[in-house]
Amino acid sequence: MKNRIAQLRKKQRYSQAQLAGAAHVTRQTINAIENDKYDPSLGLSFRLAQILGDNS
């Protein structure tokens, strides 16, 4: 499945830093996830899904 974090983050008008704060991780972690350099844990994946709530 394609990584849609950046697309959903921009749709919700979150900066990487804002999303990182809401998910309790660093901005660098969000950047690495968006650039397919880091696979988030299941728990972090669920937190990001809850925060970004893909309603499309």
Image (cartoon, grey):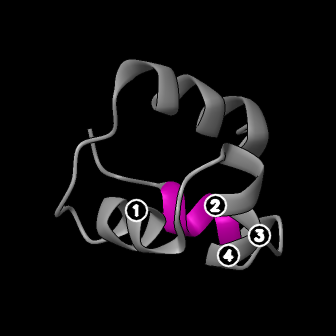
Work out whether residue 18 or residue 1 is closer to the camera in this orientation and state it. 18
Q: Secondary structure at mark 3?
A: helix
Q: In screen coordinates, is 40 left or right of 46?
A: left
Alpha carbon separation for disc pair 3 and 2: 5 Å
**Quadrant assignment for the C terminus:** top right
Amino acid at pointer 3:
Gln
The range drawn in magenta is 5-10
Q: Secondary structure at mark 4?
A: helix
Report the residue marked by disc 3: 18
Residue at image position (46%, 64%) is 30
Is label 3 in contact with label 2 (beta carbons under 8 Å)? yes
First of labels 1, 4 by sequence position: 4
Alpha carbon separation for disc pair 4 and 3: 4 Å
So how many labels did they put on this image? Answer: 4
Residue at image position (76%, 40%) is 51
Amino acid at pointer 1:
Thr
Report the residue marked by disc 1: 29
Q: Position of residue 41 (x, y in %)?
A: 34, 28
Work out whether residue 10 or residue 33 is closer to the camera in this orientation and state it. 33
14 magenta-colored: no
9 magenta-colored: yes
Q: Secondary structure at mark 2?
A: helix
First of labels 2, 1 by sequence position: 2
Report the residue marked by disc 2: 20
Res. 17 mark? 4
Is label 3 in contact with label 1 (beta carbons under 8 Å)? no
Alpha carbon separation for disc pair 1 and 4: 10 Å
Residue at image position (30%, 68%) is 32
Is label 4 in contact with label 3 (beta carbons under 8 Å)? yes
